[in-house]
Each structure stands twice: as C-alpha cells, then as structure tokens.
Amino acid sequence: KHPPEVLTLLLKRFKFDYHVKKCVKIQSKVQIPSSLQIPPNEIQSLTYELYAYVDHFGELRHGHYTVTIK
C-alpha cells in the first residue's frame, strides 16, 4: 500500500548458457540513473536518490564485491 522508505534493487547479472551447460556472467554495461521516480510522471510519485551501489568482480562461483557510497 505504501512505497518503502529505502528502495533496494537487485539486478541478476548471470544467465544459464545452454552451450556450456552452466551459469555465466552477463558482461554488458548497465547504466544506473542517479534518481528514480515511482510511479513515473504522476502527481503522487516518490523519487528515490541513488545513495550507494554494490558491484561484483569475478565469476559466478568466485570474485569479490565493492561498494560505492555517495
């Protein structure tokens, strides 16, 4: 009924590759906006400002995460 005060989004960056029969990381770039309005272009909308994001480096079974905070 009410939008959350803090919005957390997770982008699944792996897919199953039927040729190699395993999950592989999607390597395409993702552009993240600095603000997100939900619902877009409505009078009673809520605007979320980007505060931080977590980035994964490596493969599905190994790697490391970094965080960038505003």
Image (spheres, rainbow, N blue to C red):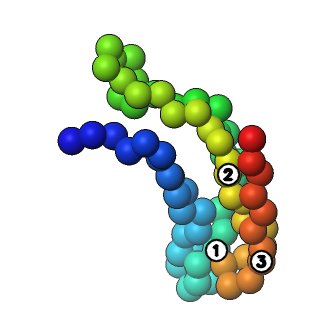
Q: Amino acid at mark 1?
A: Val
User: Whole-percent x and y of residue 1?
Assistant: 21, 41
- Foreground mark, 2 or 1, reads 2
Q: Amino acid at mark 2?
A: Tyr
Horizontal arrangement in the rendering, residue 32 relative to residue 3 (left or right): right
User: Whole-percent x and y of residue 39?
Assistant: 35, 28
SS for callout 3: strand
Q: CA distance from mark 3 to mark 1?
A: 13 Å
Choose the circle earlier in sequence order: 2 or 1.
1
Q: Which residue in the structure is indicated by mark 1?
A: 24
Check the image and report above or below for 28 versus 43: below
Horizontal arrangement in the rendering, residue 37 relative to residue 57 (left or right): left
Label 1 packing within 10 angstroms: few (<14), some (14-19), many (20+): some
**Residue contact between numbered discs 3 and 1, judged by CB atoms under 8 Å:** no
Q: Nearer the viewer, residue 35 or 24?
A: 35
Q: What residue appears at the point 39 percent right and 17 percent down from the top-left corner? A: 41
User: Residue 53 bears which disc, if any?
Assistant: 2
Q: Which residue in the structure is indicated by mark 3?
A: 63
Horizontal arrangement in the rendering, residue 66 relative to residue 22 (left or right): right
Q: Nearer the viewer, residue 69 or 66?
A: 69
Q: What residue appears at the point 36 percent right and 24 percent down from the top-left corner? A: 45
Q: Is residue 33 visible?
A: no
Q: CA distance from mark 2 to mark 3?
A: 17 Å
Choose the circle earlier in sequence order: 2 or 3.
2
